[in-house]
Image (cartoon, helix red, strand yellow):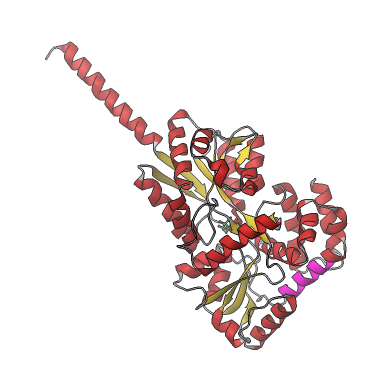
């Protein structure tokens, strides 16, 4: 073999190695997320396996912490360093905030070819798109105004699903008398705020909109808001002494094990019940927070894509397409506790709570009673959300009276605007 042939051969071997290396790099996604509880991890695994079956490998970047606050801090560090992950779990206004900084990618090629416009509800598109461009792929719709009740505990407390505030309080009183913690709760600001979402909504859909979305100072500081804080104070009386800092999934575990009667939490809690082998209707009951029937406060997890090198863009598009596949939407959301982000996914594989979630969402959307969850970043941007968290948590911990809280809330919101 001449030297020339050997050189040529070496060059083509190098080229093949480079090409396959590039292909491999292009088909890997590094995903930042906060799905670390048992139920969340099981759902994440559905996504991971789906992508792997399509030749896309997964580099995991989990940042524990329900609600995603810690994940967003980790994300800021990565973006500031000029090295964003391929895809990032993100919520509502956080997506818009990143888009405004000009650092997000463009999923238009896939979204337009697959007709996402026609099947993803406008309420989600408002966050998945910025300046008319698709920048994120919604994977689900969760809602926050649910209560998860241990069936045995409910039966021992009279066996009736509470329909209004008074019946709810009566049930919690009976649970207390029966010697269990009535309300399982984790004292973290986002969890306190999740309760607050439901309590405000239970005082009227107009009131939720005026206070949480329109930020009307009169609604924020008025008598109805005082009633909301009064209900929060009452709920606090049903929580055990060790609630401070408890993770939400540990609160779910208290209900699963029958140590507590009920948990007010978004439907990701259902993922924990299912993971523990429990069945809706038999072991646990799902109801809308009493007084919020017919209305929904939603949050949608989306995978937001950042501007990355050309070598990673193909994987971003593959991942986005996989996420919006109707079959995947069903398989994933059945495990996660949420409902599909597309309107054309059959409810066949969903349990009764999931079927109810799908129906409630469609009806609320039609009736105009579908609202973004304040607690989960779909009502107002993070700056205002955090100002609300602060007041809600101080009040829940007894550092602020029910009389003072409404004016504090209005002032905190005004200062954050
Ligand atoms: C929410 C998120 C859910 C769930 C929850 C608890 O913000 O949308 O998917 O994971 O936090 O971690």
Depth order, front residue of 175/335: 335
For the magenta stretch, what is the residue range?
226-236
Depth order, front residue of 389/262: 262
Depth order, front residue of 55/14: 55
In the image, taking residue 134 as reference, residue 27 lies left or right, namely: left
Q: In the displayed structure, would residue 317 be above or below residue 301?
A: above
Q: Which residue does the image show at 54% across and 59% down from the upper left?
A: 338
Residue 17 pos. (x, y %): 28, 28
In the image, taking residue 32 as reference, residue 195 lies left or right, namely: right
The C terminus lies in quadrant: top right
Question: Magenta segment, principal secondary structure?
Answer: helix
The N terminus lies in quadrant: top left
Residue 182 pos. (x, y %): 64, 79
Q: Which residue does the image show at 80% across and 71% down from the upper left?
A: 230
Total numbered circles: 0
In the image, taking residue 114 as reference, residue 238 lies left or right, namely: right
Q: Which residue does the image show at 16% across and 12% down from the upper left?
A: 3
User: Can you tell which quarter of the image residue 304 is in?
Assistant: top right
Q: Which residue does the image show at 43% across and 30% down from the upper left?
A: 311
| View quadrant of ligand 1 | bottom right
Residue 211 pos. (x, y %): 80, 56
Q: In the displayed structure, would residue 74 be above or below residue 357?
A: above
Does residue 373 appear in the picture of this structure? no
| Residue 235 colored in magenta in the image | yes
Q: In the displayed structure, would residue 287 be above or below residue 366?
A: below
Does residue 376 appear in the picture of this structure? yes
| Residue 295 colored in magenta in the image | no
Residue 265 pos. (x, y %): 62, 66
């Amino acid at each position: 073999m001449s030297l020339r042939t050997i050189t040529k051969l070496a060059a083509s071997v190098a080229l093949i190695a480079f090409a396959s290396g590039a292909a491999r790099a292009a088909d890997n996604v590094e995903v930042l997320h906060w799905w670390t509880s048992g139920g969340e991890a099981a759902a994440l695994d559905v996504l991971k396996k789906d992508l792997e079956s399509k030749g896309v490998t997964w580099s995991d970047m989990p940042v524990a912490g329900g609600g995603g606050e810690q994940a967003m801090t980790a994300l800021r560090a990565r973006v500031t360093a000029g090295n964003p992950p391929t895809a990032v779990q993100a919520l509502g206004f956080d997506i818009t905030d990143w888009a405004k900084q000009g650092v997000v990618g463009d999923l238009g090629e896939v979204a337009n070819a697959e007709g996402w416009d026609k099947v993803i509800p406008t309420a989600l598109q408002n966050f998945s798109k910025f300046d008319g461009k698709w920048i994120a792929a919604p994977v689900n719709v969760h809602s926050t105004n649910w209560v998860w009740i241990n069936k045995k505990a409910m039966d021992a407390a009279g066996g009736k699903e509470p329909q209004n505030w008074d019946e709810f309080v009566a049930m919690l009183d009976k649970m207390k008398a029966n010697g269990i913690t009535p309300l399982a709760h984790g004292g973290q600001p986002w969890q306190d705020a999740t309760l607050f979402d439901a309590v405000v909504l239970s005082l009227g859909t107009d009131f939720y909109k005026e206070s949480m979305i329109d930020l009307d100072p009169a609604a924020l500081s008025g008598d109805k808001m005082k009633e909301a804080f009064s209900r929060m104070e009452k709920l606090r009386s049903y929580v055990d002494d060790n609630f401070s800092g408890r993770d939400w999934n540990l609160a779910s575990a208290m209900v699963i094990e029958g140590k507590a009667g009920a948990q007010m939490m978004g439907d990701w809690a259902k993922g924990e019940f299912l993971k523990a082998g429990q069945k809706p209707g038999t072991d646990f009951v799902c109801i809308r927070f009493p007084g919020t029937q017919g209305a929904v406060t939603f949050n949608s997890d989306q995978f937001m894509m950042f501007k990355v090198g050309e070598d990673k863009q193909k994987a971003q598009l593959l991942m986005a397409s996989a996420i919006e596949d109707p079959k995947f939407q069903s398989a994933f959301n059945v495990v996660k506790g949420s409902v599909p982000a597309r309107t054309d996914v059959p409810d066949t594989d969903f349990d009764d709570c999931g079927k109810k979630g799908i129906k409630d969402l469609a009806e609320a959307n039609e009736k105009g009673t579908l609202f973004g969850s304040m607690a989960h970043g779909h009502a107002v941007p993070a700056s205002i959300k955090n100002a609300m968290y602060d007041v809600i948590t101080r009040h829940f911990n007894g550092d602020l009276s029910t009389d003072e809280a409404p004016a504090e809330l209005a002032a905190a919101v005004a200062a954050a605007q």
